Image: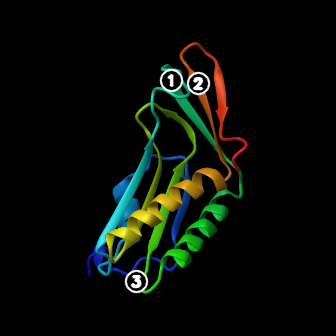
Amino acid sequence: MSAQDQVPQSRPLAQITDTAIDPREVESAVWSTADGAMVTFSGIVRDHDGGRADVQHIEYSAHPTAATTLARLCESIEAEMSGPNGVVRVGAVHRVGVLPVGEIAVVAVAVAPHRAEAFRACSELIERLKHGVPIWKRQLFTDGLTEWVGVGDC
C-alpha cells in the first residue's frame, strides 16, 4: 500500500517546527484516495511590509501552547466544514526561528471530496491560524530597525 492510499492520521496534522517545511509532506499527511480536491497555501517571507521595501528576515516565536491551539483549530474546522458533501480534513505546519526572505513560514492544506469545500476550509484555516494561534513575528529591516507584527492578534 502506498502512502497515498493510507488513511490519514486520526488527528489533524498540526505542528510548530524549527525546520524547513516541505508542502508535499504536509499534503501527503492529509490527503487520502477519498479526496478529489486539495488546496494548499504556503506563506512565504517577502521582502516588504507596511510600505517598507527592506525586510531582511523575520523571526517567528510561538507560545508553548501554540501547537495545542493549532490542533484544536484544525479539529474545529474539520468538524464545521464536513457535512453532506463529505469529510473535510486539514493540516497546518508553522515554522519558528529566523527565516530569510523566500523561506516558507507556514503551510496550510485542506482536502475534501470537492473543490468548493477544500477552498473554503483552507481559507478559513489560514485566517483563523493567523489571528488565533499564539505565534508572533518580528521583522528585521536592512537599516537595523525591527518591528513586531501580530502581537495583538492572539
Q: Which residue is disc 2 drawn over?
A: 140
Q: Secondary structure at mark 1?
A: strand
Q: Secondary structure at mark 3?
A: loop
Q: Residue at x 65, y 27 (%)?
A: 147
x and y percent of residue 152 in the render? Answer: 73, 43
Q: Residue at x 41, y 77 (%)?
A: 8
Which amino acid, by three-letter code, is at mark 1? Gln
Image coloring type:
rainbow
Q: Image quadrant of residue 50?
A: top right
x and y percent of residue 45 in the render? Answer: 47, 36
Q: Determine whether 152 is above or below 147 in the image.
A: below
Q: Which residue is disc 1 drawn over?
A: 56
For marks 3 and 2, the one nearer the N-term is 3
Which amino acid, by three-letter code, is at mark 2? Leu
Q: Residue at x 58, y 12 (%)?
A: 143
Seen from the viewer's position, the closer of residues 81 and 149 is 81
Label 3 and label 2: CA atoms lie apart by 44 Å
For marks 2 and 1, the one nearer the N-term is 1
Q: Which residue is disc 3 drawn over?
A: 86
Label 2 and label 1: CA atoms lie apart by 6 Å
On residue 124, the disc is none
Seen from the viewer's position, the closer of residues 69 and 86 is 86
Seen from the viewer's position, the closer of residues 80 and 24 is 80
Quadrant location, the N terminus? bottom left
